[in-house]
Image (spheres, rainbow, N blue to C red):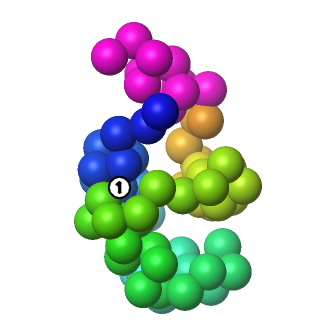
Amino acid sequence: MFDKKKIGRMFQEARKEKGMTQHQLADMADLSRNYISDIENGRYSPSAETLFRICSILEINLNKLIMTEIQE
């Protein structure tokens, strides 16, 4: 459904804009740093729960993310 590389880039950009490291995001999302790296590099697609959790932390509008994917 989602382009995992595009989502990974979006997460990475948002994380960097906030001045946050992968370790910090991982701690806040209760995930491993390696998993955050894998998502950012398009190796894994996050589950709906993980997607929601990361979007919430990075203040990414999940509805906008979904609509962008549907329109493309």
Above or below residue 55? Residue 18 is: below
Q: Amino acid at mark 1?
A: Gly
Q: Nearer the viewer, residue 53 or 18?
A: 53
Secondary structure under tag 1 reads helix
Q: Is residue 26 above or below residue 72?
A: below
Q: Position of residue 33 (x, y in %)?
A: 47, 86
The magenta segment is 63-72
Instruction: Please check the rendered image and state whether residue 64 is part of the magenta-colored stretch, yes or no.
Output: yes
Residue 64 visible here: yes
Residue 16 visible in the snapshot: no
Q: What residue is drawn where x is 51% and y is 19%? A: 67
Q: Main secondary structure of the magenta part?
A: helix
Residue at screen point 30% across, 43% down: 6
- Left or right: residue 48 compared with residue 23: right
Instruction: Give percent across and percent down for residue 19.
Output: 39, 71
Q: Quadrant of the C terminus?
A: top left
Against 32, is 9 above or below? Answer: above
Q: Quadrant of residue 71?
A: top left
Query: Residue, x 42% and y 25% (percent of image)?
Result: 69
Residue 12 locus on image (x, y percent): 34, 61
Instruction: Determine which residue is flagged by label 1.
Output: 8
Task: Indicate whether 16 appears above or below 71.
Answer: below
